[in-house]
Amino acid sequence: MADKVVGLTGGIGSGKSTVADLFATHGVAVIDTDKISHQLTAAGGGAMAAIAAAFGPQVVGADGALDRAAMRGIVFADPSARSRLEVILHPLIRSESERQLKLAEGPYALLVVPLLFETGHYDALLARVLVVDCDEAVQRRRVMQRNGMDEATVSAIMAAQLPRAERLARADDVIDNNDGLAVLTLQVDAKHRYYLANLIADPA
């Protein structure tokens, strides 16, 4: 098991996956709760039976996987639906995350949790929290280009997340992702060296 765990978070479109991939090039074990969630909601995934029972067949696609657009519409129309979905998914995601962390090797591992601060489920596992940050206009543009969403939908998702200022205030470390891959890579390299030097020396 990795000696320490760094939690990686940030708003939608901030570039968490890119940052995680850059850490992985240094041999850091990366456990991504978003990927675990996708596995659980794929066809035959461990959460699909419970989700179908809770929300009905309209949230199950023809392939047997979660229809994310349908689920998103339900969640944004009914705030209580988000809570019901989280009750199903969060314990399964937490359990699988802990399983993968136990298998991780190296001086530290990276645990990617988009709603890290919002849920508080992983606080006890973490030695540091690293926030990936960028301008909100950049977030919107990236998500619209990547996911084909309109601006209103992206804004609604951002509004459901912790405000940017609060996320930054609660971070131990911050990576700025406004200036392209070359600058981002240098920042990840520096953070990796910092974690190697400080997490190993820290007895906590």
Image: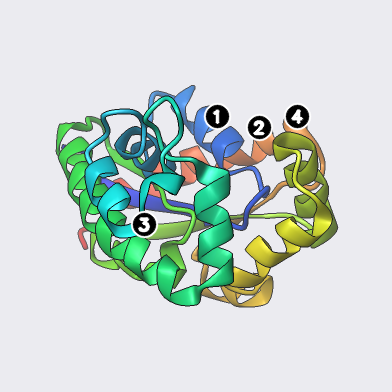
> Residue 171: where, in percent of width, then height?
52, 67
Q: Secondary structure at mark 4?
A: helix
In 3D space, how far apart are the residues under numbered discs 3 and 4 (Cα atoms)? 44 Å
Judge whether residue 5 can be spotted in this image. Answer: yes
Residue 78, x across and y down, in percent: 51, 73
Quarter residue 36 falls in: top left
- Which numbered disc covers residue 22? 1
Q: At x 22% / y 39%, what residue is drawn?
A: 46
Q: Which mark is residue 55?
A: 3
Disc 3 is placed on an element classified as: helix
Residue on which the image places disc 4 = 182
Residue drawn at x 22%, y 32% as measured from the top left: 104
User: Percent x, y for residue 139?
Assistant: 75, 52
Asked if the residues shown at circle 2 and circle 4 are in contact, with their CB atoms under 8 angstroms apart, the answer is yes
Which one is in front, 152 or 6? 152
Whole-percent x, y for residue 168 in the image? 61, 69
Amino acid type assigned to the residue bearing label 3 in the image: Phe
If you read the primary sequence from the N terminus, does the residue marked by circle 1 or circle 3 appear first? 1
Q: Decide: is 164 above or below 1.
A: below
- Above-or-below relation of 19 to 93: above
Residue at left 30%, top 54%?
89
Q: Earlier in the sequence, mark 3 or mark 2?
A: 3
Q: Earlier in the sequence, mark 4 or mark 1?
A: 1
Element assignment for label 1:
helix
Q: Secondary structure at mark 2?
A: helix
